[in-house]
Amino acid sequence: MAQSDKPLVGILTGSPSDLPVVEKAKATLDELGIASEVKVLSAHRTPDLVVEYVRAAEAAGVEVFIACAGMANHLAGTVAAHTLLPVIGVPLASGSLGGMDALLSTVQMPPGVPVATVAVDGARNAAFLAAHILSIKYPEIREKLKEARADARRRYEGSSP
């Protein structure tokens, strides 16, 4: 059963300053009834802690990782290098390039170490993608996604002039 207190999604971010964007992923997963946890860990400043967390989280039942970072953004790649679970990268807008550097470093992974990547600051879509991945195994998540799509369609249709 997916609706437990055990996190199914591990969300990592490289800096506490990124939390306002990262919290959008957590909030979306909460809306869908998917337990998750957020950790601030840097691929550059605390690489050993990143690896330690990934291994412990996987052993504890996390099934998908979301990794959010700006600038050089090696966080998603570091996570992907240490797990066979799905990793979703969220490049964050920061620095003088506004997130383009983070986007490019996230999508340009070597063969065999893939990272699914969403748009710059696309934390909500990362959460939806994680939910889609989990919905393969958990029918109740698939139902929540159907409801979310129907709600979005109703809101869109209701906004027409």
Image (tube, helix red, strand yellow):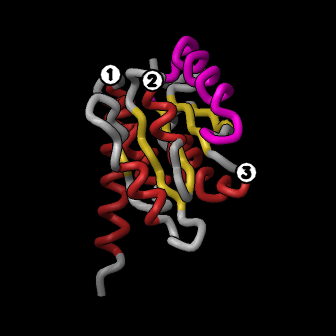
Tell whether 110 sits left or right of 33: left
Q: In this view of the protein, which residue sits in the foreground, 9 or 160?
A: 9
Q: Return the residue at label 3.
A: 16
Q: Is there a contact, CB below 8 Å, between mark 2 and mark 1?
A: yes
Q: Earlier in the sequence, mark 3 or mark 2?
A: 3
Residue neighbourhood size for the residue with mark 1, other residues' Cα within 10 Å, grouped as few (<14), some (14–19), many (≥20): few
Quadrant for the C terminus, please. bottom left
- Name the secondary structure under disc 1: loop
Quarter residue 115 falls in: top left
Task: Report the residue marked by disc 1.
Answer: 137
Mark 1 vs mark 3, CA separation in Å: 32 Å
Amino acid at circle 1: Lys
**Which span of residues is magenta-colored?**
43-64
Sooner in the amino-acid sequence: mark 1 or mark 3? 3
Of labels 2 and 1, the one closer to you: 2
Q: Is residue 63 magenta?
A: yes
The image position of residue 152, as x and y in percent, is 36, 60
Give the label, 3 or 2, closer to the camera.
3
Residue 5 visible: no
Q: Is residue 152 magenta?
A: no
What label does residue 63 carry, if any? Answer: 2
Name the kind of residue labelled 3 in the image.
Pro
Residue at 57 percent across and 73 percent down: it is 96
Give the answer, above or below, for where 137 lies relative to 15. above
